[in-house]
Image (cartoon, coloured by chain):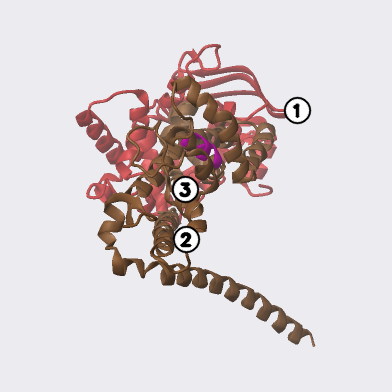
Chain colours: A red, B brown
Amino acid sequence: MVKPQLQTRKLNLWFGKNHVLHDVDLSVYSQKVTAMIGPSGCGKSTLLRCFNRMNDLIPETRITGDVLLGDEDIYKNGSDVSRIRAAVGMVFQKPNPFPKSIFNNVAYGLQIQGKIRRSELEERVEQSLKAAWLWEEVKDRLNQSAMSLSGGQQQRLCIARALANRPKVLLLDEPTSALDPQSTAKVEELCLELKKSVTILIVTHNVAQAGRISDYTAFMYLGDLVEFDKTEKMFTVPADKRTEAYLTGVFG
Amino acid sequence: MKTLKEKLFQYITYLAALFTILCMLAIIFGIFREGLPLFRVVSLKQFIFTNNWYPTHAEPAFGALALIVGSLAVTLGALLIAVPLGLGSAIFISEIAGSKLREAIKPIIELLAGIPSVVYGLFGMAFLAPLVRQWFNLDTGLNVFSASIILGVMIVPIISSLSEDALSSVPSNIREASMALGATRSETIFRAVVPAARNGILCSVLLGFGRAVGETMVVLMVAGGAANIPTSIFEPTRPITSTIAAEMGETVVGDLHYQSLFALAILLFLITLATNLIAELVFSNRRR
């Protein structure tokens, strides 16, 4: 089997006294789409945020176990959080473009990384917008505010913004839950295209969405990783009763 | 019976609002009625652009340039001090301090706004001016520099609390987006949060400017009072407001001097009106 791009080993996480993740062992394979499903509060978003250390921002967070990006333990003492976050792109539930121009939104991550030639910057912005299927719609108005875009366009702009850093992994936290069906379909198709070059880990509330786009699915329940398997397999013959109950809509 | 009470209540609030507007109109009408006749004798150009304020001479002159420059000098000086202090503390309160520290610091800074301006003036005269005189080896510590400092500290709370509102109302998902792209906390503050709050911050600076330009007691007590265009920040000056306050007692109702002070009041009113209008404009554009 291929080597995982992301991996957790015996990962436990506490917010204060609240034990949110229990002994999670998860592997996310390179250039695949892995979906995380489960009822609200099961810890799937928290797990997602372990992969780019966004949980660090929440006070009183405690983590034990390993989180590996390739071979690197990203929670190792002295690791460069900024570099890790640049290497692991993230897209959030609600589109959150900066109130800046379309161009400057995509350029943001690159400008943070340090000095970059204008010509190179323009090229990378164009590449990223093309990769997020937004270029044709915005190429004539790169200097307009990102706020003038529709919700679906804003979300694809956020994807382009994350891609500009050329990440190895893209974390998507319920990226379509605030979008209309058409925009949702477009983002889903985009995921299938993007997985050719980047590993995708997506949290979704929408079981059908997981079925449509993911190669692997992880089902989480009350902080446990209950089941992890090829999507095809899990959706036809789930190994755990809880998975079956969730997939068939008994709870959720 | 109940509807009558309701009606009466609505009527009373309506009258209160109406009365407030009437007061405003009365003030505007008053200063224009008393001030405009000056311009039958002195041209507007002369009034604003010549530097010879001799209202009580046998041949009086009413060139207010020195007073205008004085006002602008102490106000800009005050902003140079208040903007970094105010914005700095706003950033600290909104972005860096934990909630406990925030609750402790905010009211203290706001307390600065509650100190009467005459107390600021007293402090400037008694403590700051002698120090300034010693440090820089001057004839007097009552000058543009001292007045700017005191005035600056006085408007810090305006800039700080309004900027802090603007920073706090930047949605937290903007900060998340920035951090997730690899930005550090300070990069996030300066490249994402402050730019997103730009209009609110600009607004706070404009309102601070309006407050400083209209402040009277501090400049009357600390700016020194010489009606000359200052050639350095260590020279005394006499802003528009001090001039009105200091000279009104010497005038005879209706004479040219009296009218000239009202003309200064018109000028001051127009400056603050313009500042407020621009601030209003910036504020209403905030969400774009």
Kind of residue at badge 3: Gly
* The one of B27 and A2 positioned closer to us in this rendering: B27
In x, y percent, where is residue A8?
A: 57, 21
Left or right side of A247 for B70: left
Kind of residue at badge 2: Thr
Quadrant showing the N terminus of chain B:
bottom right
Of badges 3 and 1, nearer the viewer stands 3
Picture residue at 33% right of the left edge, 29% below the top: A111
* The one of B135 and A31 positioned closer to us in this rendering: B135
Of badges 2 and 1, nearer the viewer stands 2
Query: Residue B251, which numbered label?
Result: 2
Q: Can residue B152 be found in the magenta stretch?
A: yes
Q: Can residue B64 be found in the magenta stretch?
A: no
Same subunit, labels 3 and 2: the answer reads yes
Q: Earlier in the sequence, mark 3 or mark 2?
A: 3
Q: How many numbered marks, from 0 up?
A: 3
Picture residue at 45% right of the left edge, 42% below the top: B225
Residue bearing mark 3: B200
* The one of B118 and B91 positioned closer to us in this rendering: B118
Most distant residue in the front direction: B58
Quadrant showing the C terminus of chain B:
bottom left
Q: Pointer 1: residues within 10 angstroms few (<14), some, or many (20+)?
A: few
Residue bearing mark 1: A17
In x, y percent, where is residue A106?
A: 34, 37
How far is the residue under mark 3 from the one under mark 1?
A: 39 Å
Of helix, strand and loop, which one carries label 1?
Answer: loop
Contact (CB < 8 A) between labels 3 and 2? no
Of helix, strand and loop, which one carries label 3?
Answer: helix
Magenta range is B148-154
* The one of B76 and A114 positioned closer to us in this rendering: B76
